[in-house]
Image (cartoon, grey):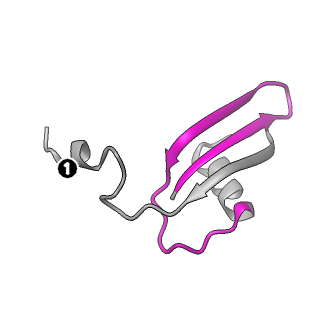
Amino acid sequence: MKSDFRVDFTNGGHIEAKDFLFDIEGSEVTPERLAEMIVSALNLLRAGPVTIFAMNVVRRGEHQDAEAAAIPR
């Protein structure tokens, strides 16, 4: 799953992400569930509203950095 989102914090400020990749089983994820996963995965204790701007299913190996990730270092 590739996503663009913004998380506003209850104590002020926010974070935004563009083309953020999540390794998720399956392709059936609601925006509400994705918002929960973002807050949990990033351990955002003071998270307020989460706005999902885009959600796209990207199969493993089909994203832009797949080739670089496949090269052992």
Per the rendered image, the range of residues in magenta is 2-31
Residue closest to the eye, 42 or 25: 25
Q: Taking the image as drawn, is residue 3 in sight?
A: yes
> x and y percent of residue 30 in the render?
69, 68
Residue at 65% from the left image edge and 34% from the top image edge? 16
Q: Residue at x 51, y 59 (%)?
A: 1
Q: Secondary structure at mark 1?
A: helix
Residue 46 visible to an observer of this rendering: no
> Is residue 17 located in the magenta-colored stretch of the structure?
yes
Taking depth in this image into account, of 44 and 55 the one nearest to the observer is: 55
Say if the magenta span includes residue 23: yes
Residue wearing tag 1: 70
Tell me where residue 61 sits by quadrant. Answer: bottom left
Q: Find residue 43 and report its horizontal and vertical position in percent.
A: 63, 43
Q: Residue at x 61, y 45 (%)?
A: 4
Residue that lies at the very extreme toward the top in this rendered image: 13
Disc 1 residue crowd, few under 14, some 14–19, many 20+, Cα 10 Å? few
Instruction: Tally the marks.
Output: 1
48 relative to 73 in the view: left or right? right
Return the x and y of residue 28 as percentages of the image width and height. 59, 75
Residue 41, placed above or below residue 23: above
Q: Position of residue 33 (x, y in %)?
A: 69, 64
Residue 71, image quadrant: top left
